[in-house]
Image (cartoon, coloured by chain):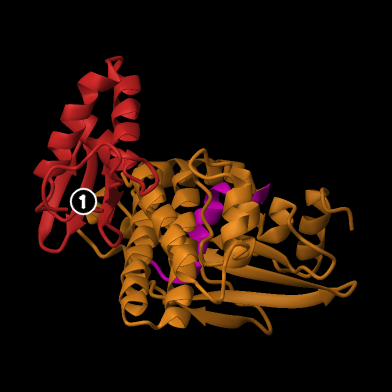
Chain colours: A orange, B red
Amino acid sequence: MQENDSGQWLRVLRERQLIPEDTLAVSLVGSVAHGWHNERSDYDFYVVTSREPDLPGQSSITLPLNPPRVRSQSFYLEERRWEVTYWLDSHYDQMLAKVSEDEYNRGVAPARVLAAREELALGRLDSRVILEGAEWFEARSKQLAESAFRSFMIARSLGASDNCVEDALGQMKSGNLESATLSARAALGSSVDALLEGHGQFGSQSPKWRPQRFRAARPDALSFEDYWALETMRDYDPEDPRPWINRVLTICQDIAMRVEVS
Amino acid sequence: MSGRPGPLDVPRRTLGIRIRRVADGLLLGYRDQAVLLSGAAELIYRLADGDRTVTDIAEGLAEEYGIDPAEALPDVVEFLMDQDDSGIFQW
């Protein structure tokens, strides 16, 4: 199948009766939508409906929403796995309400505001190939831009980084340099996520795509080459890890100074 | 540091301080303190990366504000001394 042929994808889904009558929007999401895929990558689709679908063989994924689940359906075609996730339009109302400016100003803890799949779904409102329902996406994208989603995500990632930095410093002080190294790596990951979220590159729940998100964001605060040297621990000396750990923690500080939370 | 920092001393931002960029500058959270740095104070803080000397920082400040480095140096020294108790710099 030609990967740029959105009509083809939609035709396959319709032939398998996977597009309910009350469908409001259909999108291709994930690695194929970004062009980051390989021959083993799944095709991932989001279908937004007004009512819960009732499809043969469907499975459910539990989420903190009402109703508390999304349905999903998967199949194989030409050795490629296709997965369709069914979101309700009202799920988006609820997810956007969780990340409203009011909630942010109320001091809701950023780490707990959204489940991982919810975060992914909101991030994908602006990061997808639309197969159907362009107006629905336009309206929802506008709501997302007016929400505090970006602020929540950045605050979450910076908070996670701060916690790891604190761990790394404590572990370094006690001489536990192995754990300090891992904590510093985790701090770097979260700081870079915050930096990328500041550039509208969401998807921190999938760290495997961090290099691709980094290239897409092209942040001024850190070059890709410098980032990749740190991520791959190029200058790490197992005999003397402290300089590398301190350098990483300093970079985390540099990033925090550059990323505006709100 | 106890006493007056010299031109060749090298301050660095203390690691472990929680930093947030806000509209008015940099908000630092350290122990039970919160400090808001803006303008020249923010710039000095940003330049104190553990590689630059006090003189280098004064030169950076002078460049940013279009003043003579010799004029900037006492301001940098004074700011660093003022912050000595806050714990936001290490030497």
Q: Position of residue A104 (x, y in %)?
A: 25, 54
Tell me if residue A62 comes above or below residue A99 in the rendering.
below
Name the residue located 46 percent from the left edge and 50 percent from the top edge: A195
For the question of whether residue A233 can be seen, the reply is: yes
Instruction: Please state which of residues B71 and A227 is positioned toward the viewer in this rendering.
Output: B71
Q: Considering the numbered disc 1 on the image, is that residue within a helix, a strand or a loop?
A: strand
Name the residue located 38 percent from the left edge and 75 percent from the top edge: A64
Q: Position of residue A45 (x, y in %)?
A: 67, 63
For the question of whether residue A21 can be seen, the reply is: no
The residue where tag 1 is placed is B28
Q: Which residues are magenta?
A: A113-131
Q: Position of residue B79 (x, y in %)?
A: 15, 37
Q: State left or right for residue B6 relative to residue A23.
A: left
Instruction: Please rate how many residues cluster around mark 1, counting C-alpha atoms within 10 Å: few if below 14, some from 14 to 19, many from 20.
Output: some
Instruction: Please state which of residues A222 and A171 is positioned toward the viewer in this rendering.
Output: A171
Name the residue located 66 percent from the left edge and 48 percent from the top edge: A130
Q: Position of residue A234 (x, y in %)?
A: 63, 63
- Quarter occupied by residue A54: bottom right
- Quarter occupied by residue A247: bottom left
